[in-house]
Amino acid sequence: GAIIDEYANRIVNLHPALLPKFGGVGMWGHNVHEAVLASGEKESGCTVHLVDAGCDTGRILVQKKVPVLPGDTPETLYARIAPEEHKAMVEGVCLLAKSL
């Protein structure tokens, strides 16, 4: 859209999984963590990426990984990922600022 075009390569998104897996329409919040657990993945994490016209398809700036542990629930997995999201967003914004 017009906003994405106007601010190309300057809008970031924080996604609660390791893109390109578990991205796209409907993949937000606990939906992502439920999908990760249902898939049997051994690790998950978060991704900071540039926003483009697609859904979760922009260039990846930062990813942080965490293990998926036996007995995890969406809540326990989220609790492990959340602190990494905070670090990843700071790193992603710093990388973006240095590139402007």
Image: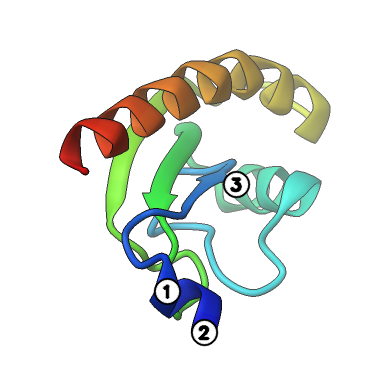
Rendered residue at 49%/35% (across/down): 46
Disc 2 residue type? Ala
Rendered residue at 43%/41% (across/down): 48
Q: Mark 1 points at which residue?
A: 6
Rendered residue at 82%/27% (across/down): 75
Q: How crowded is mark 2: few (under 14 residues within 10 Å), some or many (20 or more)?
A: few
Disc 1 residue type? Glu
Measured along the vertical axis of the image, is residue 71 above or below residue 31?
A: above
Measured along the vertical axis of the image, is residue 62 above or below residue 59?
A: above
Are dots 2 and 1 in contact, CB under 8 Å?
yes
Residue 66, position as x, y percentages in the image: 47, 21
Disc 3 residue type? Val
Residue 43, position as x, y percentages in the image: 45, 31
Q: Mark 3 points at which residue?
A: 36
Q: Is mark 3 on a helix, strand or loop?
A: helix
Q: What element carries label 2?
A: helix
Q: How many labels does the image show?
A: 3
Q: Mark 2 points at which residue?
A: 2
Image quarter of residue 9: bottom left
As drawn, is 66 to the left or to the right of 59?
A: right
